[in-house]
Image (cartoon, rainbow, N blue to C red):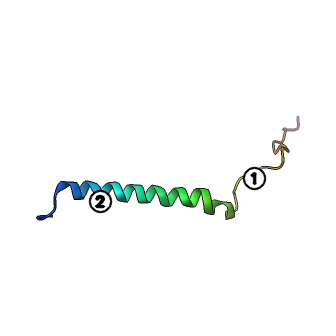
Amino acid sequence: MAGRGRGDLVLGIVLGVALGIAIVAIFVFVFSEDTVDAPSINNGASTERSARP
């Protein structure tokens, strides 16, 4: 890092963190629909089950 300033290091770290967050957000909001445990809305039907006494 002899010829580069501290600004390049900070910029690289910030861009790396932003890219990582963007990749995770894209996966969560776009590709998580295909996973097994993806939540779904059952047209207002309740999915709660009461315990039997």
**Quadrant where the image shows the C terminus:** top right
Q: Amino acid at mark 2?
A: Gly
Determine whether, in the image, residue 7 is placed left or right of residue 16.
left
Residue 51: percent from the left, percent from the top? 84, 38
Residue 23, numbered circle: none
The secondary structure type at the circle numbered 1 is loop
Depicted 30 relative to depicted 51: above or below: below
Q: Residue furthest right?
A: 53
Determine the image quadrant of residue 52: top right
Determine whether, in the image, residue 28 is placed left or right of residue 16.
right
Q: Amino acid at mark 1?
A: Ser
Determine whether, in the image, residue 13 is placed left or right of residue 7.
right
Cα separation between marks 2 and 1: 38 Å
Residue 11: percent from the left, percent from the top? 28, 56
Rendered residue at 36%/59% (across/down): 16
Determine the image quadrant of residue 38: bottom right
Depicted 53 relative to depicted 47: above or below: above
Callout in the foreground (2, 1): 2
Q: Residue furthest left?
A: 2
Residue 12: percent from the left, percent from the top? 29, 59
Q: Which residue is mark 1?
A: 40
Count every numbered label the image shows and give the total: 2
Packing grade of label 1 (10 A; few <14, some 14-19, many >=20) is few
Residue 12, numbered circle: 2
Packing grade of label 2 (10 A; few <14, some 14-19, many >=20) is few
Rendered residue at 82%/50% (across/down): 42
**Quadrant where the image shows the N terminus:** bottom left
